[in-house]
Image (cartoon, rainbow, N blue to C red):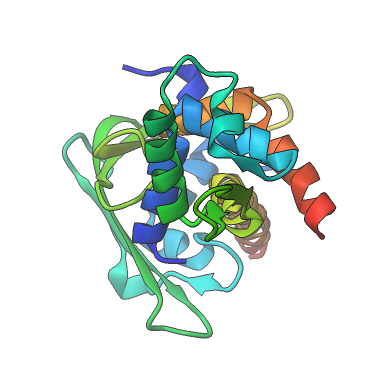
Amino acid sequence: MSTDRLSVIFAALADPTRRAILARLAEGDATVSELAEPFTISLPAISRHLKVLEQAGLITRSRSAQWRSSSLQAEPLREATAWMERYRRFWDDNFARLDAHLKRIQEQEKQP
Amino acid sequence: MSDATTELVITRVFDAPRELVYRAFTDPDQLAAWFGPVGWSVPRDSVTVEPKVGGHQRFTMVNDEDPAQASPVDATFVEVIENELLVGEQDTAAIPGLGGAVMRLRVEFHDEPGGKTRLVVTQGPYQPEIAEMAREGWVSSFTKLDKMLG
């Protein structure tokens, strides 16, 4: 995945309302008004959030204008969370190689 | 300025004296021999290490299977205590998910009994949202979601 695409996903995830919307959609598809229920913000504001999430590929929205429901897309989320683990894995790998390297160096030093 | 919640901290004990572990980081021949994840190599001619304040730490990680995939590192040391501490800063404006334009990597070398060394690596800052998502349990809930969706 390109870094640009990851940036768009992280920007979309940066907002707590959008994360709450995603959490709601994890339970099942919902319409704009259903999504707006727990919040004190307007329907147009919710729609704007949905547009950001859609552009990031985190949700899809049905074509039907009247009952336009949103559903969660798991793949970009999986990629985003995999990214978070990347640095930790990087150091795990790196440390395993450093460990082997240090053993090698010390064995070389012991030899006459 | 540092905020523990937006930094990755990893500690590991190595069965080698502190000076040796420090040298593995600062000797270009040694760094080239071990640095990088499995499947990646660091060409010796890409490595520059000047362990002093204002000195550079440069090297490139190259993918073994696809050498077109290369990840250059260009950091500047901001703190150096021989055999004890290396702190480097790297301009990372282009890397997503990081909290600022500068990524700081702090490597502490501590004595452990039995001639061993405890290495403490601190890397960050990361974008606060990521730390927040971790706190909110997003990572685990996504894992559950993954299972649900197969």
On the image, the x and y values in percent for residue A86 come to 56, 51
Q: Residue furthest left?
A: B54
- Is A14 on the left or on the right of B78, as rendered? right
Q: Is residue B29 left or right of residue A109?
A: left
- Vertical side of B108 occupied by A7: above or below: below
Camera sees residue B121? no
Q: Quadrant of the C terminus of chain B?
A: bottom right
Q: Residue at coordinates 44% horizontally, 59% vertically from top-left?
A: B31
Q: Is residue B8 above or below residue A58?
A: above
Quick one: which residue is furthest to the front in this view? A66
Q: Nearer the viewer, residue B20 or A3?
A: A3
- Answer with left or right where residue A36 lies relative to residue B60: right
Res B135 quadrant in image: top right
Residue drawn 58% across and 56% down? A79
- Tell me if B124 is positioned left or right of B80 in this view: right
Q: Nearer the viewer, residue A64 or A49?
A: A64
| Numbered marks: total | 0
Report x, y in % for residue A93. Answer: 63, 56
